[in-house]
Amino acid sequence: MDVRSQTKKNYTREVWFDGREVSLERQDIWGLINNSPIKKVVVSVEQRRSGHYPLKTELITEIRHIEHLDDITGDETVLSADQNLLDSAKQRGYKTCIFISVEGREAMEQSWQDALKYDYVLVDFDLPTNIPLELIIARLQGRETVLLKKVKTFSEIEVVFGVLEKGSDGVLFTGTDFNEIMKVSEYLTAQDIHDIELHPLLVSGVQNVGMGFRACIDTTGMMTQEEGMIVGSTSHGGIFICSETHYLPYMNLRPFRVNAGAIHSYVWMPNDSAEYLSDLAAGSRVLCVDTAGKARELTVGRVKIEVRPLLLIKGAAVGQEINVIVQDDWHIRVMGADGQPRNASLIRPGDELLGYVCEPGRHVGIKVNETIIEK
């Protein structure tokens, strides 16, 4: 089973903001939208006529009458529940989105068939169950039509994007709560996860440093043998610690776990941030990387902290001194520069591991430009 192919998104989710119920006087909301990663905004014809929107904004205009099409210009999208109006819009060369309110099985079956005629389909359901969404996702897989679900809260977005492990292609967010919109904005920012560049790290020293607290990061996802996390004692880089997916003679494998290291350590997270292992908790998001530097986000299910003998591994990558302190045991695996796992207790000076180097300087895990010396 290719766990990575099932969990890593291979396309960008569509997130539209429904501005039709937001008056143009609500500058707090419009200011937040205008300065957020949200680009696609649904408006009424009246809002379109009276509002001024940033150049980045891609308008989706709801039309209710044929003459409303005269207000649409350029390569834009028209939204309507009226198929006749959408057919006229198609004839004029506009992208089209049909809105369908699904009530009952017959309506659900008809909805996906109608959806195939248009670029987008926006669905809403009469009941809170996700079963009809699952059915429509299944019917539309492999089709060109983009499926969006109407939602009101950020938590709904996370659920909708997880349905059938695939989720809908996007959502229309209809909420007007400022804090909820902030969560959506932060979520979109976090989805912009960039791959990282890994470098060979030449080990210069290995030392048992006595007993201490170490943390296992248990996630709600599954990792492969090529995946793990970046962990280090300093803000300017870390070392690739493997997931527990490699042979253990007396234990079952734990593909959801990374036995990360001493609790003072940083673990790298999305948005080029880092967090102390001691500060992680259920719901935290951490960065999972593979040997090629491909990165994805995983959610922490729990952090298990116990007293264990600890091992200091230090070395240099691209001229930068880096170290990590891990549990001193044979079953802890650290990724070698050749993409093969190494048993922590067998690592010696002269060995090459996989390391990550970044600019130094962090305050509460966020990178800042400051003078900082870490030893």
Image (spheres, rainbow, N blue to C red):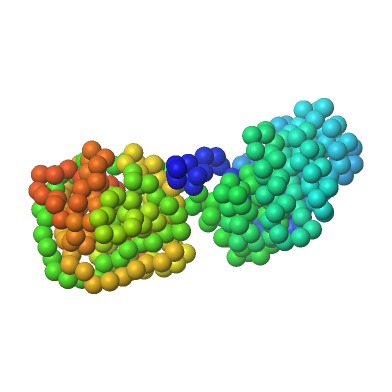
Q: Quadrant of residue 183?
A: bottom right
- Which quarter of the figure is the C terminus placed in? bottom left
User: Measured along the vertical axis of the image, is residue 144 above or below residue 50?
Assistant: above
Is residue 268 visible in the rendered structure shown here?
no
Q: Is residue 77 left or right of residue 156?
A: right
Is residue 183 visible in the rendered structure shown here?
yes
Residue drawn at x 34%, y 68% is 304
Residue drawn at x 76%, y 53% is 124
User: Measured along the vertical axis of the image, is residue 278 above or below residue 324?
Assistant: below
Q: Quadrant of residue 117?
A: top right
Q: Is residue 210 left or right of residue 19?
A: left
User: Measured along the vertical axis of the image, is residue 177 above or below residue 105?
Assistant: below
- Which quarter of the figure is the N terminus placed in? top left
Residue drawn at x 17%, y 43% is 352
Nearest the camera: 251 or 125?
A: 251
Q: Position of residue 84 (x, y in %)?
A: 88, 36
Q: Position of residue 338 (x, y in %)?
A: 23, 38
So how many labels did they put on this image? 0
Nearest the camera: 24 or 141?
A: 141
Q: Is residue 190 left or right of residue 327?
A: right
Residue drawn at x 61%, y 57% is 159
Q: Position of residue 351 (x, y in %)?
A: 13, 44
Nearest the camera: 141 or 272?
A: 141
Q: Position of residue 287 (x, y in %)?
A: 39, 52
Q: Is residue 232 left or right of residue 195?
A: left
